[in-house]
Image: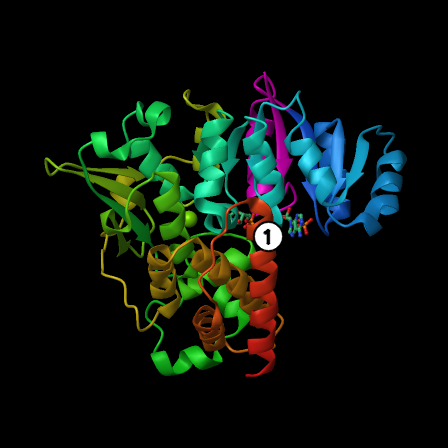
Amino acid sequence: MQNLCVLGATGSIGKSTLDVVRRHPDRFNIVALTANRQIDELVKQAVEFKPDYVVCANPDDYSLLASGLAEEGLSAKVLVGQDGLITVASLPEVDTVMAAIVGAAGLAPTYAAACAGKKILLANKEALVMSGDLFMQAVMKHKALLLPVDSEHNAIFQCLPASFCEHRDWSQLGIAKILLTGSGGPFLKTPMAELQHVTPEQACAHPNWDMGRKISVDSATMMNKGLEFIEAHWLFGVPKELIQVVIHPQSTIHSMVQYQDGSVLAQMGQSDMRIPIAHVMAFPERIDSGVAPLDFTTLASLEFLPPDFERFPNLKLAIDAVEAGQWASTALNAANEISVAAFLDGRITFLDIARINNEVLEKSASHVLSNIDEVVAYDLQSRELANRVLEGL
Ligand code: NDP
Ligand code: MG
């Protein structure tokens, strides 16, 4: 029996995780569930999964959550705020932490899980983008097991030899290239002149995947692929020259590894996050994810294109940030969280997202980030800068 803590249980990844748990009550036991705004949903989940702990990120929601649980006759312990999230991510009785909070808010609890040597199922790519080497060092030092949930990284992981998990040394594996695929999102073929006027609803209507709103906008700007480029660099320890972004509009192949002998291994499947989630939850075994198998006889042709940096300037910003250093990835991620939230609130246009991100990077100074507190401080500073740039538009 694996004891699970699900950070971000009320989100898209959190709910898919609980769906896999629901199918395998003999394998998984929920110890802790966490939420931000959706307190009713958290109570509903607590009724079904009977966790020992529930956490709401906002301390003001304590009474609402506690009374909701009491009405259902539940005695789960209620914790609040970042301290509560860190506590449940490091509980001795927790074996596995699903890191599915969106954005920088997930960094502290995910880092705590690494320091507590947990098996970490990483969906929260922003945490790794912000902290890169520091996060990976904590994983190694505390012998945590870091498994990628992000479908591309999960695909790459599945295409690497099993021995990668033990020594994480890509240079011994004969890899020629990591081929990071991306659909190109809803605006791959939209005339450039129309991009100025696209709405949050259009941006969130991803052709292949059903996801939370922030990552959906990131997919539309291809910042998501940029964040994933940085994520792949840290997760697999490969230099940026070995990572190539390939547009694949059908999202049937979830990424590939090309070896020096010319072989290319690809992982394929339906666009349903329960596949990578079930893979990492059961790893190294395989279990039913609830997803129907691919029917190759019904597949249309598979297309592949190079990325267009003029259409997707955010992708270029992220690739360049790897070269510039950790401070640049941290600043870019912070700026992007501010600009995407402003776009979703109807305060700026779609094209302003990349403008703000670019200006924040131009105005940020190179900075050495030597511990997580410095990362958090630099993230805050970059958010303030992004807000100033936004007001000046
Ligand atoms: P959602 O927006 O659907 O869910 C986010 C979760 O985080 C919710 O449980 C939300 O709580 C919680 N949350 C939000 N803000 C805070 C905060 N300040 N403090 C604590 N908890 C918070 O996002 P997704 O599930 O789509 O994405 C989660 C992560 O997984 C992201 O990093 C994303 O990039 C990554 N990912 C997602 C994929 C997908 O298919 N959705 C695919 C690959 C990666 P509440 O809902 O209660 O407000
Ligand atoms: Mg992805």
Tell me the colour scheme of the image.
rainbow
Task: Relative to 369, say whether 174 is above or below.
Answer: above
Depth check, front residue: 217 or 324: 324
Q: Which residue is mark 1?
A: 376
**Residue 144 appears left or right of 191:** right
- The local crowd at label 1, few if under 14, some if 14 to 19, many if 20 or more residues have their Cα within 10 Å, is some
Image: magenta residue range: 1-29
* Residue in the picture at 58% in, 32% down: 113
Callout 1: CB less than 8 Å from ligand 1: no
Find out whether residue 24 is within the magenta segment.
yes
Q: For the N terminus, which image quadrant?
A: top right
Residue type (three-letter) at the residue carrying disc 1? Val
Report x, y in % for residue 266.
25, 39
* Residue in the picture at 30% in, 23% down: 163
Query: Toward which corner of the image does residue 222 lie, by quadrant?
Result: bottom left
Q: Secondary structure at mark 1?
A: helix
How many numbered badges does the structure rendering display?
1
Report x, y in % for residue 215.
50, 56
**Residue 321 appears left or right of 264:** right
Report x, y in % for residue 309.
30, 68
Query: Toward which corner of the image does residue 34 lie, by quadrant?
Result: top right
- Residue 205 seen in render: no
Task: Relative to 264, say whether 103 is above or below.
Answer: below
Depth check, front residue: 260 or 344: 260
Report x, y in % for residue 76.
80, 29
Find out whether residue 376 is within the magenta segment.
no
* Residue in the picture at 86% in, 46% down: 64
* Residue in the picture at 33% in, 64% down: 316
Q: For the C terminus, which image quadrant?
A: bottom right
